[in-house]
Image (cartoon, grey):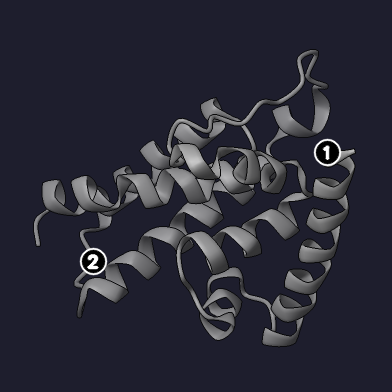
Amino acid sequence: MNYDEIADKYVDIVYRTALSYCKNKEDAEDVVQNTFVKLLRTNPDFSDEKHIRHWLIRVAINECKDIWKSFWRKNVTSIELLECDVEAVPNEQKDLFESVMKLPSKYSIVLHLYYYEGYHVNEIAALLNISETNVQTRLMRARKQLKLQLKEDLE
């Protein structure tokens, strides 16, 4: 598979993953750009489609972490509230996706990878470099927080 085919096929997945971690459109777009620049520069040999997807998501997560560790992010307080871009999500799921995005990043990323991207706990653990138990704990806590948040929204 060449670069253009990979970019066309996986840009939405990388964007949604970055958006769930960064929580704003601009940073997510930067992450997508940096991820595909790395793909172009390194030109890794992939064994199959699953390997491509896993590599892209892992690089995107690392790029998100780099953004959050940057000097700018640590030393500047945003005046505006961060808003999620839900255009990449189907209409019937927008409200739920917005609620997921309101959760802390460590919870929203595991929910996103598990429910939206279809990864299993062991795969998420490998992507995030955490234990499977930690992934299960984060999923449990995220579901609990999401349930409370949705209940509050209904009231």
Amino acid under disc 1: Asp
- Quadrant into which the C terminus falls: top right
Report the front residue among 31 and 72.
31
Residue 147 visible in rendering = yes
Mark 1 and mark 2 residues within 8 Å of each other at the beta carbon: no
Quick check: 19 above or below 49? above
Quick check: 83 above or below 37? above
Give how far apart the Cα atoms at labels 1 and 2 are: 45 Å
Q: Residue furthest front?
A: 155
Quick check: 35 above or below 109? above
Q: Is residue 77 left or right of residue 100?
A: right
Q: Considering the numbered disc 1 on the image, is that residue within a helix, a strand or a loop?
A: helix
In the rendered structure, find residue 97 and report the number of the disc placed on it: none
Residue appearing at x 83%, y 67% in the figure? 141
The first of marks 1 and 2 along the sequence is 2
Q: Considering the numbered disc 2 on the image, is that residue within a helix, a strand or a loop?
A: loop
Residue 9 screen position, x and y as percent = 22, 52
Residue appearing at x 23%, y 66% in the figure? 44
Q: Is residue 123 left or right of residue 11?
A: right
Residue 8 screen position, x and y as percent = 20, 45
In the rendered structure, find residue 44 and report the number of the disc placed on it: 2
Residue appearing at x 74%, y 86% in the figure? 133
- Quadrant into which the N terminus falls: bottom left
Q: How many marks?
A: 2
Q: Is residue 122 left or right of residue 77?
A: left
- Circle 1 residues within 10 Å: few <14, some 14–19, many ≥20: few
Residue appearing at x 44%, y 60% in the figure? 57
Q: Where is mark 1, residue-wise?
A: 153
